Structures are given as C-alpha cells and as structure tokens.
Amino acid sequence: MNLYSSEVGFYIPSFLYMKVDTKASLEKIFGTPIESVFVHEYVHFLQDISTVFGLVNTSYTAEYFKSMASYIRQNNVQKISAPILPEVLKDHMVENELLFFGYCGDGAFISLDEWEIDFVSDKDEVKVRDKKLQKIVLHMRHKLYDTKKEYNFGAIAIMESLACLIERHIYHDDSCSIDNLPYGAAHHIVKALYREMSDKPWLIAAICEISLMAYHPAGIFLLLITCMKRDNFMPGTALDMFNYAKQIKFEDESSMTDLLVSIADHAKKQIDGIFTSKLIKDGSSWFTHLVDESLKLRNSHPCFLANLLEMSSTLAKKRLLKIIDLVGVPLMFNSDDVLFNLGNTIKKYPGIIYYPAANEIFEIFSSGQQIRCRLNKYCESGPEDMEVDANCLSSPWYRANMCPFAVLWKTWDFSGREVIATKF
C-alpha cells in the first residue's frame, strides 16, 4: 500500500521509515518550518503500528514477499523476471491483492478547486470470489470541462484525512487543505451523508480512527455514520464515539480490542518470519516493541489520535511529544539521505536499517520498474562507511560488499540470481 507521497515528505507503510525534504538534522526538527510535515508522517507511522488496517497491511506485505521468495527458491529461478505477479504465486494471493486494494481505495491528489463533488454513492459492491466488497464512491465533475470521474473512498483517504486534521489543528495552516483529496475526503463524505457532523473535526477524526480498526475501514466509516444518523446520535467526546461504536458488530463479530490484539499477534509472527537470521533478528524485536508500546497506549486511550483535536494546539503538541517518548519513532531520512533516529533505538536495535533495504528488494520484485538500490547515498554517508559501486545503481544483487541490501539478498538465499525488470 502506498500513501499519497507529497513533495515535502512521505512515510513507507510496513517498512517503518519516513523521508522529510530538508537538509537539516532531523534531531532538531521541532521549531523548524518542516515540523508539521514530520507530524503528518508520524501520524501515518502510528496508524501503521496501532490499527487493525495498518497491521493487516504489514501482514499482507510480509505474506506477499514470502510468497515471492518461495516462488524464486522452489522453482530455482536464476533470472528473476520482475514484477512477480500474484498470478504466479499461491492461489490465495490473487484474492488477497484484489481484496486489499479494494480496501485501500484511491489515493491520488485531486484539487477541489478544479473538481466538484456531485454526489456520494454507497450502493455498489464488488464481488471477489465468495466475498462482497462495498464501494463508497465520490462522483465528481470538472468545473470547466464536461468531464466526470469517480473517486473510491477507502483506507488511504481515511488515513490521510486523519493525519491532515491533526496537522491543521496543531499548526493552524492550510498547507494540508480539506479542499483537496485525499486529505479532505472524510470531511466531504460526512458533509454529504450527515451534514450536522461536518463542523466537528474531532468527531470526524474519531470516526476515521475507529474505522481503521477494521479490515474494510470505508465500510465501517459508512456504517458508523449511517447508524449515528438513524439514532440521531451526536457524541460529546471521542470516547463517547468509541463507546457507541463498540455496540456495532465489526468483522467476524469480534470486538475492536480482540480483533486488534489478534491482528497484531499475526503481524508480529509474519515479520518474525522475514527477519530470520541472528544478524537481522533484532529488526523483528524492534517491530514487536513498537506494536506492544502502541497497543498499551491504545488500550488506555482508545482514540488517542482524535484526542489531540479535543485539546488546544499547544497541549496537543505536548501530548504528541509524550507519545513519541512512549512509543518511539520510525527511521527518518532527510533530503540528503542522512539517517536519523530520535533516542537510542539504532544502538539498541541495529538491525532496523534492514527495513529500508527490505523495501528496496520488495519494490524491485513487485514493481518491475526499479533496478537500483536507493540507499546508495545513505551507504556513502552512513556510520559504516560502506563502499558504493556501479552495481548499486544498476544491479545491486551483484554487490559483494555486505551492505544492508547484500546482507538480505544473501540471507534470503538469493545469491547468484539476477533481476530482469520488464517494465523498466
């Protein structure tokens, strides 16, 4: 799953790292103009490790990767043709991909200065084998031309909407505008379906956060609004909203708490199955630590992200700093690809550098458009002072030096194999 990547920063779900477009030291990011970008991406990190959907995404990504690796080894593939599509993997991977990307919905940037929303529909369903997937669609019309388009509301729009609401509340600017999609998607859905709620950002944030406690967040988002309108329910706090939502049956009739714990345990096992050797094992330990700490926070404060909008911007910022202290931060690169991590995480879990390296291998296998390792600038300036050569930019699988990419390539038994990128 790819969240919308802005020019000023992005977070990579499942691989636990972000990039911020500044040459400054990220250890001193607070108090700088780029602080709001960090906060937006940090919210995505928290969504990744503390919600059902974020952890399902991690499990899906890990399963997809393990299926690709198994296909390569079992068939003794020496020249790996990329992308490796779900069709050549295990049967269930095709269904998983269709369902998962149906859950994700659209994430493209659309300016509502150019487009207007005609109406929102929620009647269509897509059938994936024996499962039906409800679609929530924004039907749009161009303001100048006779052009129409549809925007599928899903988890990406919900995650971006929540991050945007928090960023706007703390920093009081329009750099993240609800008049653009995906950032304002949740607001416009609420405005279309239950207008009386649309002037309550904290409530929209709470519904977004609660919706992410499900496999199909958009379906739960719609269900909550429909039930609230039917019951003429208007909560006074985010906790009221959470307690109301607990009365509604989610997937498999599981409680939100039980489902989250179950999905978290599964995600930890999936990551443990990737970081297998002793050399990289602490990468798995770090993930377990992050999830455990974030779930402790969610257990005591079920809507801890929406809670930020219930306090002043000053208090919200202080609370966010406390969350950083409690949970931790992802790996962070600045525009020069210098790596930063607040605190002593890298010293405690040195294997965490293998997350961005794993993302490079995953992108090479799954996209068919990448043949280089984008960590070359990090390796040039990193603490290990690794030697960078021409292979980094064109064929990193030939690397002899034990850089993070080469370590994983050897650990996962890909030595001697090369990649043919068919879409490059």
Image (spheres, rainbow, N blue to C red):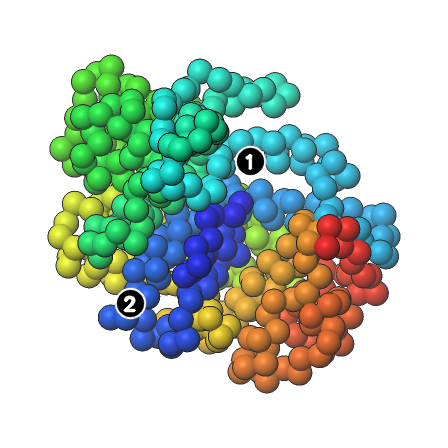
382 relative to 227, above or below? below
Residue count near mark 1 (Cα–Cα under 10 Å), binned few <14, some 14–19, many ≥20: some
Q: Position of residue 221 (x, y in %)?
A: 35, 29
Q: Are marks 2 and 1 in contact (CB under 8 Å)?
A: no
Q: Is residue 417 left or right of residue 141?
A: right
Which label was assigned to residue 101? 1
- Label 2 and label 1: CA atoms lie apart by 34 Å
Viewer-closest of 363 and 192: 192
Q: Is residue 255 visible?
A: no
Q: Is residue 372 left or right of residue 112?
A: right
SS for tag 1?
helix
Mark 2 and mark 1 lie on one chain; the one further toward the N terminus is: 2
Q: Position of residue 333 (x, y in %)?
A: 46, 69
Residue count near mark 2 (Cα–Cα under 10 Å), binned few <14, some 14–19, many ≥20: few
Residue at figure coordinates x 44%, y 37% from the top left: 155
Residue type, label 2:
Pro
SS for tag 2?
loop
Q: Is residue 168 left or right of residue 386?
A: left
Q: Is residue 278 left or right of residue 316?
A: right
Q: Position of residue 105 (x, y in %)?
A: 49, 34
Residue under label 2: 33
